[in-house]
Image: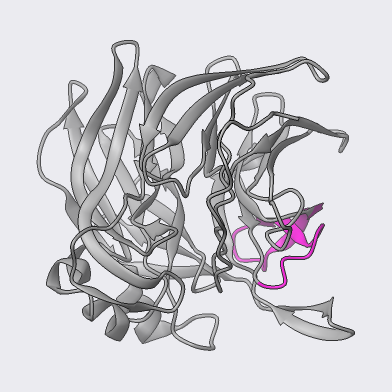
Amino acid sequence: MVSSRTSRLGCALVAALALMIPSPLLAARDDSASGTDIEVIAEGLSEPRGLVFGPGKRELYVAEAGAGGAGPCAQHAILMNACYGKTGAITRIDSKGVKTFVKNLGSVAGPIEGMGPHDVAVHGRRISFSTGFAGAPGLRAQFGKDAEKTLGYLMSVETKGGHRRDNVSRVADLVAFEDEANPAGGPVDSNPFGVLALGNRTYVADAGGNDLLVVSRHGRVKTVAVFPDRLVDFGGGQFPMNAVPTTVVKGPGGDLYVGQLTGFPFPIGGARVYRIEKGEDPEIYAGGFTNIIDIAFGKDGSLYVLEIAHNSLMADEPEGALIRVDPSGDREIIADGLVFPGGVALGKKDEIYVTNCGVCFEDGEVLRINP
Protein backbone atom coordinates (compact mmCIF):
# COMPACT_ATOMS: atom_id res chain seq x y z
CA MET A 1 0.00 0.00 0.00
CA VAL A 2 1.26 3.48 -0.82
CA SER A 3 0.91 5.94 2.05
CA SER A 4 -0.54 9.46 1.90
CA ARG A 5 0.79 12.89 2.76
CA THR A 6 -2.19 15.23 2.76
CA SER A 7 -5.58 15.27 4.46
CA ARG A 8 -8.74 14.08 2.81
CA LEU A 9 -10.26 16.88 0.71
CA GLY A 10 -13.72 15.38 0.53
CA CYS A 11 -15.70 13.31 -1.95
CA ALA A 12 -18.69 13.64 -4.21
CA LEU A 13 -20.74 10.90 -5.81
CA VAL A 14 -21.72 11.62 -9.40
CA ALA A 15 -24.32 10.00 -11.59
CA ALA A 16 -22.93 8.73 -14.89
CA LEU A 17 -19.23 9.14 -14.23
CA ALA A 18 -18.44 9.01 -10.54
CA LEU A 19 -15.26 10.78 -9.60
CA MET A 20 -14.73 11.46 -5.92
CA ILE A 21 -11.73 13.13 -4.34
CA PRO A 22 -10.39 11.72 -1.07
CA SER A 23 -7.04 13.21 -1.53
CA PRO A 24 -4.19 11.98 -0.32
CA LEU A 25 -1.53 12.16 -2.97
CA LEU A 26 1.18 9.57 -2.85
CA ALA A 27 4.13 10.18 -0.60
CA ALA A 28 5.92 6.88 -0.22
CA ARG A 29 7.04 5.94 -3.74
CA ASP A 30 8.28 2.45 -2.98
CA ASP A 31 6.02 -0.41 -2.01
CA SER A 32 8.44 -2.62 -0.12
CA ALA A 33 5.91 -5.42 0.22
CA SER A 34 5.43 -5.91 -3.53
CA GLY A 35 8.73 -4.44 -4.71
CA THR A 36 6.92 -1.89 -6.84
CA ASP A 37 8.87 1.32 -7.41
CA ILE A 38 6.81 4.44 -8.15
CA GLU A 39 8.44 7.58 -9.53
CA VAL A 40 6.80 10.97 -10.12
CA ILE A 41 7.76 12.29 -13.56
CA ALA A 42 5.32 15.22 -13.68
CA GLU A 43 3.40 17.09 -11.00
CA GLY A 44 1.27 20.18 -10.54
CA LEU A 45 -1.13 19.09 -13.29
CA SER A 46 -4.81 20.06 -13.39
CA GLU A 47 -7.00 16.95 -13.35
CA PRO A 48 -4.80 14.72 -15.52
CA ARG A 49 -6.81 11.96 -17.17
CA GLY A 50 -5.85 9.89 -20.23
CA LEU A 51 -2.31 9.72 -21.63
CA VAL A 52 -0.66 8.25 -24.72
CA PHE A 53 2.75 7.94 -26.32
CA GLY A 54 3.56 9.59 -29.62
CA PRO A 55 5.35 7.89 -32.54
CA GLY A 56 8.43 5.99 -31.41
CA LYS A 57 7.27 6.38 -27.80
CA ARG A 58 9.67 9.29 -27.33
CA GLU A 59 7.07 11.67 -25.91
CA LEU A 60 4.04 11.26 -23.70
CA TYR A 61 0.89 13.34 -24.13
CA VAL A 62 -1.46 13.91 -21.18
CA ALA A 63 -5.03 15.27 -21.22
CA GLU A 64 -5.70 17.76 -18.42
CA ALA A 65 -9.40 18.36 -17.76
CA GLY A 66 -8.67 21.72 -16.11
CA ALA A 67 -10.32 23.65 -13.30
CA GLY A 68 -13.10 25.55 -15.09
CA GLY A 69 -12.95 29.31 -14.77
CA ALA A 70 -14.83 32.53 -14.11
CA GLY A 71 -17.91 31.56 -16.07
CA PRO A 72 -20.56 31.58 -17.39
CA CYS A 73 -21.80 29.45 -14.53
CA ALA A 74 -24.79 27.14 -14.21
CA GLN A 75 -26.11 24.23 -12.17
CA HIS A 76 -24.75 20.97 -13.55
CA ALA A 77 -26.36 17.64 -12.68
CA ILE A 78 -23.01 16.12 -11.75
CA LEU A 79 -20.64 19.00 -11.03
CA MET A 80 -23.23 20.98 -9.04
CA ASN A 81 -22.63 24.75 -9.26
CA ALA A 82 -20.08 24.83 -12.07
CA CYS A 83 -18.31 27.48 -14.13
CA TYR A 84 -16.68 27.47 -17.55
CA GLY A 85 -13.14 28.56 -18.35
CA LYS A 86 -10.26 27.84 -20.71
CA THR A 87 -8.05 25.91 -18.29
CA GLY A 88 -7.94 22.53 -20.05
CA ALA A 89 -4.73 21.46 -21.76
CA ILE A 90 -2.75 18.78 -23.52
CA THR A 91 0.67 18.44 -21.89
CA ARG A 92 3.76 16.86 -23.42
CA ILE A 93 6.46 15.02 -21.46
CA ASP A 94 9.76 14.13 -23.12
CA SER A 95 13.48 14.11 -22.46
CA LYS A 96 13.45 17.92 -22.28
CA GLY A 97 10.87 18.01 -19.51
CA VAL A 98 7.19 18.82 -19.07
CA LYS A 99 5.57 21.44 -21.31
CA THR A 100 2.04 22.52 -22.18
CA PHE A 101 1.50 21.47 -25.80
CA VAL A 102 -2.04 22.80 -26.33
CA LYS A 103 -3.46 25.32 -23.87
CA ASN A 104 -6.64 27.35 -23.31
CA LEU A 105 -8.93 24.37 -23.92
CA GLY A 106 -12.49 24.38 -22.63
CA SER A 107 -13.15 23.19 -19.08
CA VAL A 108 -16.14 23.27 -16.76
CA ALA A 109 -15.74 22.59 -13.05
CA GLY A 110 -17.64 22.64 -9.80
CA PRO A 111 -16.23 22.81 -6.29
CA ILE A 112 -14.88 19.26 -6.35
CA GLU A 113 -14.11 18.17 -9.91
CA GLY A 114 -14.30 19.23 -13.53
CA MET A 115 -14.61 18.06 -17.09
CA GLY A 116 -12.60 19.06 -20.12
CA PRO A 117 -9.98 17.15 -22.13
CA HIS A 118 -10.51 13.56 -21.00
CA ASP A 119 -8.31 11.43 -23.22
CA VAL A 120 -5.80 11.82 -26.03
CA ALA A 121 -4.77 9.67 -29.00
CA VAL A 122 -1.99 10.00 -31.55
CA HIS A 123 -1.83 8.76 -35.13
CA GLY A 124 1.02 10.03 -37.25
CA ARG A 125 1.04 13.83 -37.07
CA ARG A 126 -2.51 14.08 -35.79
CA ILE A 127 -3.32 14.36 -32.11
CA SER A 128 -6.98 13.76 -31.26
CA PHE A 129 -8.64 14.30 -27.90
CA SER A 130 -12.06 14.09 -26.32
CA THR A 131 -13.63 16.84 -24.26
CA GLY A 132 -16.21 15.78 -21.71
CA PHE A 133 -19.42 17.38 -20.59
CA ALA A 134 -22.04 14.91 -19.27
CA GLY A 135 -25.32 16.38 -20.36
CA ALA A 136 -27.55 17.44 -23.23
CA PRO A 137 -27.21 20.43 -25.62
CA GLY A 138 -29.61 22.58 -23.59
CA LEU A 139 -27.51 22.26 -20.46
CA ARG A 140 -24.30 22.92 -22.37
CA ALA A 141 -25.75 26.14 -23.78
CA GLN A 142 -26.16 27.50 -20.26
CA PHE A 143 -22.37 27.68 -19.97
CA GLY A 144 -22.08 30.04 -22.92
CA LYS A 145 -21.12 30.01 -26.59
CA ASP A 146 -17.52 28.99 -25.94
CA ALA A 147 -18.72 25.92 -24.03
CA GLU A 148 -21.00 25.02 -26.95
CA LYS A 149 -17.93 25.07 -29.22
CA THR A 150 -15.49 23.21 -26.97
CA LEU A 151 -17.20 20.75 -24.60
CA GLY A 152 -18.54 17.36 -25.64
CA TYR A 153 -16.42 17.09 -28.78
CA LEU A 154 -13.81 15.03 -30.52
CA MET A 155 -11.10 17.55 -31.39
CA SER A 156 -7.71 17.38 -33.09
CA VAL A 157 -4.54 19.28 -33.83
CA GLU A 158 -1.90 18.61 -36.49
CA THR A 159 1.81 18.59 -35.66
CA LYS A 160 5.05 18.93 -37.59
CA GLY A 161 8.53 18.38 -36.25
CA GLY A 162 7.12 17.83 -32.78
CA HIS A 163 5.39 21.21 -32.75
CA ARG A 164 1.82 22.32 -33.31
CA ARG A 165 1.24 23.10 -36.97
CA ASP A 166 -2.11 24.83 -36.77
CA ASN A 167 -5.04 25.59 -34.51
CA VAL A 168 -7.26 23.08 -32.78
CA SER A 169 -10.09 21.75 -34.97
CA ARG A 170 -13.51 20.51 -33.91
CA VAL A 171 -13.93 17.14 -35.59
CA ALA A 172 -17.35 16.09 -34.27
CA ASP A 173 -19.94 17.38 -31.81
CA LEU A 174 -20.77 14.21 -29.87
CA VAL A 175 -23.27 15.91 -27.58
CA ALA A 176 -25.25 16.89 -30.69
CA PHE A 177 -24.96 13.34 -32.06
CA GLU A 178 -26.31 11.91 -28.81
CA ASP A 179 -29.20 14.36 -28.96
CA GLU A 180 -30.06 13.32 -32.52
CA ALA A 181 -29.39 9.57 -32.39
CA ASN A 182 -29.39 8.54 -28.70
CA PRO A 183 -28.16 5.01 -29.61
CA ALA A 184 -28.59 3.50 -26.13
CA GLY A 185 -31.93 5.18 -25.43
CA GLY A 186 -32.92 6.79 -22.16
CA PRO A 187 -32.15 10.39 -21.19
CA VAL A 188 -29.92 12.33 -23.58
CA ASP A 189 -26.50 12.40 -21.95
CA SER A 190 -23.09 12.54 -23.62
CA ASN A 191 -19.71 12.51 -21.91
CA PRO A 192 -17.00 11.66 -24.49
CA PHE A 193 -14.17 9.91 -22.69
CA GLY A 194 -11.71 7.29 -24.01
CA VAL A 195 -10.31 7.76 -27.53
CA LEU A 196 -8.42 5.50 -29.93
CA ALA A 197 -7.05 6.70 -33.28
CA LEU A 198 -6.70 4.12 -36.07
CA GLY A 199 -5.90 5.52 -39.50
CA ASN A 200 -8.56 8.00 -40.56
CA ARG A 201 -10.97 6.77 -37.90
CA THR A 202 -11.14 7.65 -34.24
CA TYR A 203 -13.13 5.61 -31.74
CA VAL A 204 -14.71 7.29 -28.74
CA ALA A 205 -16.14 5.62 -25.64
CA ASP A 206 -19.04 7.84 -24.54
CA ALA A 207 -19.39 7.39 -20.79
CA GLY A 208 -22.66 9.31 -20.72
CA GLY A 209 -24.20 7.84 -23.86
CA ASN A 210 -23.21 4.26 -22.91
CA ASP A 211 -21.94 3.53 -26.38
CA LEU A 212 -18.85 3.24 -28.56
CA LEU A 213 -18.71 5.62 -31.51
CA VAL A 214 -16.45 5.90 -34.54
CA VAL A 215 -15.70 9.25 -36.14
CA SER A 216 -14.28 9.73 -39.61
CA ARG A 217 -11.60 12.33 -40.20
CA HIS A 218 -14.29 14.51 -41.76
CA GLY A 219 -16.52 14.29 -38.69
CA ARG A 220 -19.08 11.67 -39.67
CA VAL A 221 -20.20 9.77 -36.56
CA LYS A 222 -21.49 6.19 -36.45
CA THR A 223 -22.42 3.86 -33.60
CA VAL A 224 -20.18 0.81 -33.23
CA ALA A 225 -21.67 -0.75 -30.09
CA VAL A 226 -24.19 -0.04 -27.34
CA PHE A 227 -23.78 -1.11 -23.72
CA PRO A 228 -27.18 -1.57 -22.06
CA ASP A 229 -27.99 -1.29 -18.36
CA ARG A 230 -27.55 -4.37 -16.17
CA LEU A 231 -29.59 -5.34 -13.14
CA VAL A 232 -27.47 -5.66 -10.00
CA ASP A 233 -28.27 -6.41 -6.38
CA PHE A 234 -28.81 -3.30 -4.28
CA GLY A 235 -30.89 -2.48 -1.21
CA GLY A 236 -32.50 -5.89 -1.05
CA GLY A 237 -33.62 -5.79 -4.67
CA GLN A 238 -32.44 -5.28 -8.23
CA PHE A 239 -31.17 -1.95 -9.52
CA PRO A 240 -30.54 -0.96 -13.18
CA MET A 241 -26.84 -0.04 -13.40
CA ASN A 242 -25.47 2.01 -16.30
CA ALA A 243 -22.49 0.60 -18.18
CA VAL A 244 -20.43 3.84 -18.35
CA PRO A 245 -17.73 2.84 -20.87
CA THR A 246 -14.59 4.88 -20.22
CA THR A 247 -11.84 3.42 -22.41
CA VAL A 248 -11.28 1.78 -25.79
CA VAL A 249 -8.08 0.14 -27.07
CA LYS A 250 -6.98 -2.15 -29.89
CA GLY A 251 -6.01 -5.55 -28.57
CA PRO A 252 -4.32 -8.72 -29.79
CA GLY A 253 -5.78 -9.84 -33.10
CA GLY A 254 -7.00 -6.37 -33.96
CA ASP A 255 -10.30 -6.44 -32.08
CA LEU A 256 -11.47 -3.47 -30.00
CA TYR A 257 -11.68 -3.72 -26.21
CA VAL A 258 -13.79 -1.47 -24.00
CA GLY A 259 -13.58 -1.09 -20.22
CA GLN A 260 -16.50 0.10 -18.10
CA LEU A 261 -16.61 2.18 -14.96
CA THR A 262 -20.19 1.10 -14.15
CA GLY A 263 -22.73 3.49 -12.70
CA PHE A 264 -24.39 3.60 -9.31
CA PRO A 265 -24.26 1.53 -7.05
CA PHE A 266 -20.70 0.79 -8.24
CA PRO A 267 -20.59 -2.85 -7.04
CA ILE A 268 -17.24 -4.40 -6.21
CA GLY A 269 -16.38 -6.84 -9.00
CA GLY A 270 -19.14 -5.46 -11.25
CA ALA A 271 -16.97 -3.93 -14.00
CA ARG A 272 -16.07 -5.75 -17.19
CA VAL A 273 -13.82 -5.53 -20.20
CA TYR A 274 -15.68 -6.22 -23.44
CA ARG A 275 -14.30 -7.42 -26.77
CA ILE A 276 -15.94 -6.05 -29.89
CA GLU A 277 -15.58 -7.94 -33.15
CA LYS A 278 -16.74 -6.26 -36.33
CA GLY A 279 -20.46 -6.79 -36.85
CA GLU A 280 -20.95 -8.54 -33.51
CA ASP A 281 -22.43 -7.47 -30.18
CA PRO A 282 -19.94 -6.82 -27.37
CA GLU A 283 -18.85 -9.99 -25.57
CA ILE A 284 -17.37 -10.24 -22.10
CA TYR A 285 -13.58 -10.66 -22.31
CA ALA A 286 -12.81 -10.37 -18.59
CA GLY A 287 -14.91 -9.53 -15.53
CA GLY A 288 -14.66 -9.13 -11.80
CA PHE A 289 -13.10 -5.65 -11.82
CA THR A 290 -14.27 -2.53 -10.03
CA ASN A 291 -14.72 0.93 -11.57
CA ILE A 292 -12.39 0.67 -14.58
CA ILE A 293 -11.08 4.01 -15.84
CA ASP A 294 -8.55 2.77 -18.44
CA ILE A 295 -6.99 -0.35 -19.95
CA ALA A 296 -3.92 -1.22 -22.03
CA PHE A 297 -2.34 -4.31 -23.58
CA GLY A 298 1.32 -5.25 -23.17
CA LYS A 299 3.54 -6.78 -25.84
CA ASP A 300 3.01 -10.27 -24.44
CA GLY A 301 -0.77 -9.90 -24.56
CA SER A 302 -1.16 -9.10 -20.88
CA LEU A 303 -4.09 -6.84 -20.08
CA TYR A 304 -3.47 -3.92 -17.72
CA VAL A 305 -6.60 -2.70 -15.96
CA LEU A 306 -6.60 0.62 -14.13
CA GLU A 307 -9.34 0.90 -11.52
CA ILE A 308 -10.22 4.37 -10.30
CA ALA A 309 -11.48 2.68 -7.13
CA HIS A 310 -10.48 -0.90 -6.38
CA ASN A 311 -12.73 -0.90 -3.31
CA SER A 312 -15.65 0.85 -5.07
CA LEU A 313 -16.55 4.49 -5.45
CA MET A 314 -19.05 3.87 -2.63
CA ALA A 315 -16.19 3.26 -0.16
CA ASP A 316 -15.48 5.86 2.52
CA GLU A 317 -12.01 6.31 1.05
CA PRO A 318 -11.79 4.84 -2.45
CA GLU A 319 -8.35 3.69 -3.52
CA GLY A 320 -7.26 3.09 -7.09
CA ALA A 321 -5.29 0.09 -8.30
CA LEU A 322 -3.50 -1.23 -11.37
CA ILE A 323 -4.03 -4.91 -12.16
CA ARG A 324 -2.20 -7.06 -14.69
CA VAL A 325 -3.97 -10.03 -16.24
CA ASP A 326 -1.52 -12.30 -18.05
CA PRO A 327 -2.55 -14.28 -21.15
CA SER A 328 -3.34 -17.33 -19.00
CA GLY A 329 -5.82 -15.29 -16.94
CA ASP A 330 -3.75 -15.01 -13.77
CA ARG A 331 -4.10 -11.63 -12.04
CA GLU A 332 -1.66 -9.53 -10.07
CA ILE A 333 -2.05 -6.14 -8.43
CA ILE A 334 0.88 -4.07 -9.73
CA ALA A 335 0.14 -0.95 -7.68
CA ASP A 336 -2.54 0.03 -5.20
CA GLY A 337 -3.28 3.00 -3.00
CA LEU A 338 -3.53 5.24 -6.06
CA VAL A 339 -5.64 8.39 -5.76
CA PHE A 340 -8.31 8.51 -8.44
CA PRO A 341 -6.00 7.57 -11.29
CA GLY A 342 -7.13 8.69 -14.75
CA GLY A 343 -5.17 6.80 -17.39
CA VAL A 344 -2.50 4.20 -18.13
CA ALA A 345 0.05 3.89 -20.96
CA LEU A 346 2.91 1.48 -21.63
CA GLY A 347 6.39 2.50 -22.78
CA LYS A 348 8.81 0.80 -25.19
CA LYS A 349 9.66 -1.94 -22.71
CA ASP A 350 6.22 -2.05 -21.14
CA GLU A 351 7.17 0.46 -18.46
CA ILE A 352 3.90 1.64 -16.94
CA TYR A 353 2.80 5.27 -16.79
CA VAL A 354 -0.27 6.32 -14.81
CA THR A 355 -1.92 9.67 -14.15
CA ASN A 356 -2.66 10.08 -10.46
CA CYS A 357 -5.26 12.30 -8.78
CA GLY A 358 -7.24 12.94 -11.93
CA VAL A 359 -9.66 15.07 -9.92
CA CYS A 360 -7.08 17.39 -8.36
CA PHE A 361 -7.17 20.93 -9.74
CA GLU A 362 -3.50 21.65 -8.98
CA ASP A 363 -1.82 18.52 -7.62
CA GLY A 364 -2.25 15.94 -10.37
CA GLU A 365 0.71 13.73 -11.25
CA VAL A 366 2.11 11.36 -13.83
CA LEU A 367 3.76 8.33 -12.26
CA ARG A 368 6.17 5.80 -13.72
CA ILE A 369 5.59 2.40 -12.14
CA ASN A 370 8.36 -0.20 -12.26
CA PRO A 371 7.15 -3.53 -10.86
Relative image position of residue 78 (x, y in whole percent): 46, 73
Answer yes or no: is residue 219 visible. Answer: no
- The answer to whether residue 96 is left or right of residue 195 is left
Q: Is residue 277 above or below residue 8?
A: below
Residue sitting nearer the eye, 178 or 264:
264
Q: In which quarter of the image is residue 100?
A: top left
Answer yes or no: is residue 126 visible. Answer: yes
Tell me which segment is drawn in magenta. 264-288
| Image point (69%, 51%), residue name | 318
Q: In this view, does 112 lie above or below 323?
A: below
- The answer to whether residue 45 is left or right of residue 323 is left
Residue sitting nearer the eye, 263 or 166:
263
Relative image position of residue 120 (x, y in whole percent): 38, 43
| Residue 278 part of the magenta-drawn span | yes
Q: In this view, does 71 lie above or below 324?
A: below
| Image point (16%, 48%), residue name | 168
Applied colour scheme: one colour
Relative image position of residue 308 (x, y in whole percent): 63, 49
Residue sitting nearer the eye, 265 or 56:
265
Relative image position of residue 178 (x, y in whole percent): 40, 78
- The answer to whether residue 232 is left or right of residue 203 is right
| Residue 81 part of the magenta-drawn span | no
- The answer to whether residue 338 is left or right of residue 287 is left
* Outermost left residue: 166
| Image point (44%, 59%), residue name | 112
* Outermost front residue: 7
Q: Quadrant of residue 184?
A: bottom right
Q: In which quarter of the image is residue 158?
A: top left
| Image point (49%, 74%), residue name | 209
**Quarter occupied by the N terminus:** top right
